[in-house]
Image (cartoon, helix red, strand yellow):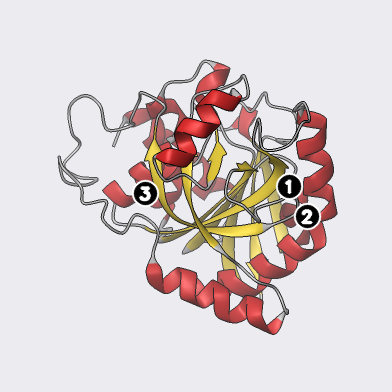
Amino acid sequence: MSSLVSSAIEFIASRVSVRPKVAVVLGSGLGAFADSLDNAVSIPYSEIPGWPQSTAVGHAGKLVLGEVAGVPVAVLAGRAHLYEGYTAQQAVYGIRALHGLGVESLVLTNAAGGIKAGFGPGTLALVSDHINLQGQTPLTGPNDDSLGPRFPDMSEAYSKRFREIARQFAAGMCLELPEGVYAALPGPSYETPAEIRYLRVIGADLVGMSTVPETIAANHMGMQVLGISCVTNFAAGVIEQKLNHKEVLETGELVRDTMVSLLRGVLPRLV
């Protein structure tokens, strides 16, 4: 582990006594969950040594530690993206730090475009697998054997057990959680209709600009991952409508309460 990440871990540990075993990363427009924690302590990323700053609209840029149903939880309200100019290694800085704090279970949320029929705005979908089209991986370069193996297995990048736990809880909410394959592109431009046709052919159901570097880093370190996409718009070409980030944030606001309820119910069950 790099000395910079170690410094971040030491700084966080000096600020809070909470030692979380489960954590969640909140995507665009999904930050409301961070405000729902009990006994919460908030630390701006700007105060943590080496932590990349969130510049995307809809990302608060803070680490929140608190409790859900008595279970210690860490929340990253905002993430770093490749399109902001960060490397894949920088994009997973927070995931490395969370692991160093003791987190073993990770929930990654994101805003995504819906490719698959029926994946319209407002749909919450579990990520069953991913396709990395970002041209980067956080594992490039010398391997840190203290974190994980040189060639980590990715055959179950998103935990089947976690997905079943999420589905069971969602059923009690009368909420259907369909599954889909998430394709990650670098962004920040939205995909062209031709690119969406290509993604559909290669098996993608959802498309976005995040999550995959974090999933790779988490699996490398032996963490279990649950991915939840909030479909905020139809992907380009699915309907005759131009795409914009305002729509992403508005849809995130519409599903806010549902997402908060889902996360509050699921997170304690992942410990």
Depth check, front residue: 177 or 222: 177
Labels in figure, total:
3
Q: Residue furthest top?
A: 85
Tell me residue 28's x, y (percent). 69, 39
- Image quarter for residue 137? top left
Q: CA distance from mark 2 to mark 3?
A: 25 Å
- Which residue appears at 34% of the width and 43% of the height? 216
Could you classify mark 1 by the number of other residues whose Cα lies within 10 Å: few (under 14), some (14-19), or many (20 or more)? many
Q: CA distance from mark 2 to mark 1?
A: 8 Å
Instruction: Name the element at disc 2.
Output: helix
Residue 218, label in figure: 3
Mark 2 or mark 3: name the one nearer the start of the chain: 2
* Amino acid at dot 2: Asp
Is residue 271 in view from this perspective?
A: no
- Which residue appears at 72% of the width and 79% of the height? 173
Q: Is residue 200 above or below residue 154?
A: above
Residue 35, label in figure: 2
Q: Residue furthest bottom?
A: 172
- Residues at discs 2 and 3 in contact (Cβ within 8 Å): no
Depth check, front residue: 114 or 228: 114
